[in-house]
Image (tube, grey):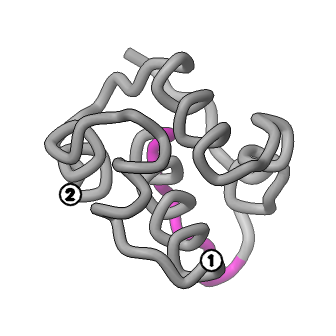
Amino acid sequence: MGKGRIIMSISEAVANRIVELCNEKHITINKMSTISGVTQSTVNDIVNHRSKNIGIVTIKKLCDGLSITITEFFDTDMFKELEQEMY
């Protein structure tokens, strides 16, 4: 593990990525939910770390709303450096 490395779960990484993409595209979480067809409460639960098991269908809908591929969503250092989660 690298010095100063932050350990996060996959759900935290997804939440952070959603916020990052909203910032990049200059849209609000509410706007993202509207353009993706995912309820605002679902997106809020994800970004506020209340949802731990985020479905791939939900992530795909968010990607479609943002006009990005699912590969683009996950193709960041944040996901490449995730530790294996043990349950």
The residue indicated by pointer 1 is 25
Label 2, residues with CA under 10 Å away: few <14, some 14-19, many ≥20: few
**Amino acid at dot 1:** Lys
Instruction: Please tell me in which quadrant of the rendered image residue 54 appears.
Output: top left
Determine if the magenta segment contains residue 63: no
Residue under the image location 46 percent in, 21 percent down: 86
Image depth: mark 2 or mark 1 in front: 1
Disc 2 secondary structure class = loop
User: Viewed as shown, does residue 65 lie left or right of 67?
Assistant: left
Label 1, residues with CA under 10 Å away: few <14, some 14-19, many ≥20: few
Residue extent of the magenta highlight = 3-10
Looking at the rendered image, the quarter that the C terminus falls into is top left
Residue under the image location 64 percent in, 53 percent down: 66
Residue under the image location 37 percent in, 63 percent down: 31
Front-most of residues 47 and 33: 33
Indicate the position of residue 80 as horizontal and vertical percent values.
80, 49
Q: Reading the chain from its start, which is encountered first: label 2 or label 1?
A: 1
Front-most of residues 44 and 11: 44
Residue under the image location 30 percent in, 56 percent down: 47
